[in-house]
């Protein structure tokens, strides 16, 4: 999946709105994206409206068939996160709550905000592998490939069989590093260490291996 970034005034990199929408559409269509294929195994945030090309998101201030802007998506995330942030005031080191808030901001493509909450979750619980995997995803989406790989390697030190970390490690190696052999190795290890993987997910991984082997 191509990952093109534009420079911010601060010198960092973020996705342009058009690229964010394209990424979201591809994620929904093929599943082969950082943090998406195995999200069912992780803690999830309260539902957040998805970006849609066919209809506006309720309450987002859109008209006609327009997609919400990144600013509108940020407002949606802030609103959805309010009750969780209220709970965090009395329990600031609750890694589960911090993970849920991070998931909200990730779901609405507010990756920098998500990085902050996932990082806080890890400060509260350094063995929180789901939070570390999500942090890796968001670091990758903000352009920090090496940071993302480092987080996934740490996840695998804590949980060597973790399917999410192994799958995403393969995606980043193939997409960012052009390391097809490394990607195939990670995905083969995923299948070997997770024999009970359900048929749909197993098929996705096998297809990824077959496609990478051709490159």
Image: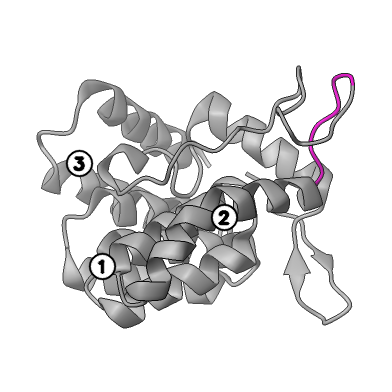
Q: Nearer the viewer, residue 131 or 97?
A: 97
Q: Is residue 102 above or below residue 67?
A: below
Query: Percent x, y for residue 108?
Result: 62, 47
Q: Secondary structure at mark 2?
A: helix
In this rendering, does residue 2 appear at all?
Answer: no
Q: Is residue 126 above or below residue 29?
A: below
Q: Start and end of the magenta stretch?
A: 64-69
Q: Which residue does the image show at 66% across and 46% down from the upper left? A: 76
**Which of label 2 and label 1 is nearer to you?**
2
Crowding at dot 1, Cα within 10 Å, few <14 / some 14-19 / many 20+, comes out as some
* 49 with respect to 102 (left or right): right
Disc 1 marks which residue? 128
User: Residue 105, labelled with which disc?
Assistant: 2
Disc 3 marks which residue? 191
| Whole-number angstrom distance, CA of label 2 to CA of label 1 | 18 Å
Looking at the rendered image, the quarter that the N terminus falls into is top right
Q: Is residue 177 above or below residue 213?
A: below
**Which of label 2 and label 3 is nearer to you?**
2
Mark found first going from the N terminus, 3 or 1: 1
Q: Is residue 109 above or below residue 91?
A: above
Mark found first going from the N terminus, 2 or 3: 2
């Amino acid at each position: 999946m191509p990952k093109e970034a534009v420079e911010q005034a601060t010198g960092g990199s973020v996705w342009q709105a058009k690229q964010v929408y394209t990424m979201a559409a591809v994620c929904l269509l093929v599943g082969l994206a950082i943090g998406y294929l195995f999200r069912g195994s992780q803690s999830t945030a309260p539902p957040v409206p998805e970006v849609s090309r066919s209809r506006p998101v309720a309450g987002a201030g859109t008209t006609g068939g327009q997609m919400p802007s990144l600013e509108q998506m940020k407002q949606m995330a802030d609103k959805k996160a309010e009750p969780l942030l209220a709970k965090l005031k009395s329990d600031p080191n609750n890694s589960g709550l911090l993970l849920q808030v991070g998931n909200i901001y990730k779901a609405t493509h507010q990756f920098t905000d998500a990085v902050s909450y996932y990082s806080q979750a890890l400060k509260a619980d350094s063995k929180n592998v789901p939070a570390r995997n999500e942090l890796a995803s968001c670091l990758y989406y903000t352009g920090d490939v090496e940071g993302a790989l480092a987080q996934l390697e740490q996840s695998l030190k804590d949980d060597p069989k973790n399917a999410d970390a192994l799958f995403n490690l393969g995606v980043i190696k193939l997409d960012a590093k052009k390391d097809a052999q490394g990607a195939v190795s990670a995905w083969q290890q995923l299948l070997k260490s997770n024999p009970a993987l359900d048929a749909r997910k197993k098929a996705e991984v096998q297809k990824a291996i077959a496609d990478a082997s051709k490159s």
